[in-house]
Amino acid sequence: SDTVDNFWLKIAMQFGFPALILLIMCILLIVKKVSRKMKANSSKEFQLACRGWLISIISVSIVGCTVDFFGSNHVYFYFMLGIGAALINMCEKPRWSNELT
């Protein structure tokens, strides 16, 4: 067959196993940090946002085992990773906040 139906297999075929391992490690690290941040924060809205992101990224990662992401779905996957990285930094004081007050 000329097509690859697995996102993770396609990443390994195009860029090699180091790229696949780094991508998986990136996802696991962001998931771990978001889940810790969710438990540490007392805001119900933030916890719900983190829980929704965790459910979404885990389900999208599982879907990647059955189908290849292309076009807008590929962008959506990396956008979801970016949202997770942004959730890690939310609810923290910026480093420059002392200078402004």
Image (spheres, grey):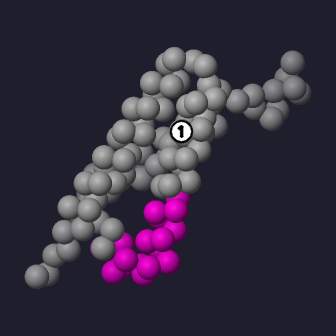
Q: Is residue 11 left or right of residue 89?
A: left
The x and y percentages for residue 73 are 28, 52
Dividing the image into 4 quarters, which one contains the N terminus? bottom left
* Magenta-highlighted residues: 10-26
Q: Is residue 35 above or below residue 77?
A: above
- Classify residue 2 by image quadrant: bottom left
Q: Is residue 88 above or below residue 42?
A: below
Residue pictured at 35% horizontal, 41% vertical = 56
Q: In this view, does 38 lie to the left or right of 56?
A: right
- Classify residue 94 by image quadrant: top right
The secondary element bearing badge 1 is classed as helix
Residue pictured at 20% horizontal, 61% vertical = 66
Residue pictured at 63% horizontal, 29% vertical = 40
Residue pictured at 56% horizontal, 54% vertical = 29
* Residue farthest to the left, as pictured: 1
The x and y percentages for residue 79 are 42, 47
Residue pointed to by mark 1: 35
Q: In this view, does 12 lie above or below 44?
A: below
Dividing the image into 4 quarters, which one contains the C terminus? top right
The x and y percentages for residue 87 are 55, 36
- For disc 1, the neighbor class at 10 Å (few under 14, some 14 to 19, many from 20) is some
Q: Is residue 27 left or right of residue 74?
A: right
Q: Give amino acid for label 1.
A: Ser
The x and y percentages for residue 22 are 52, 68
> Is residue 11 highlighted in magenta?
yes
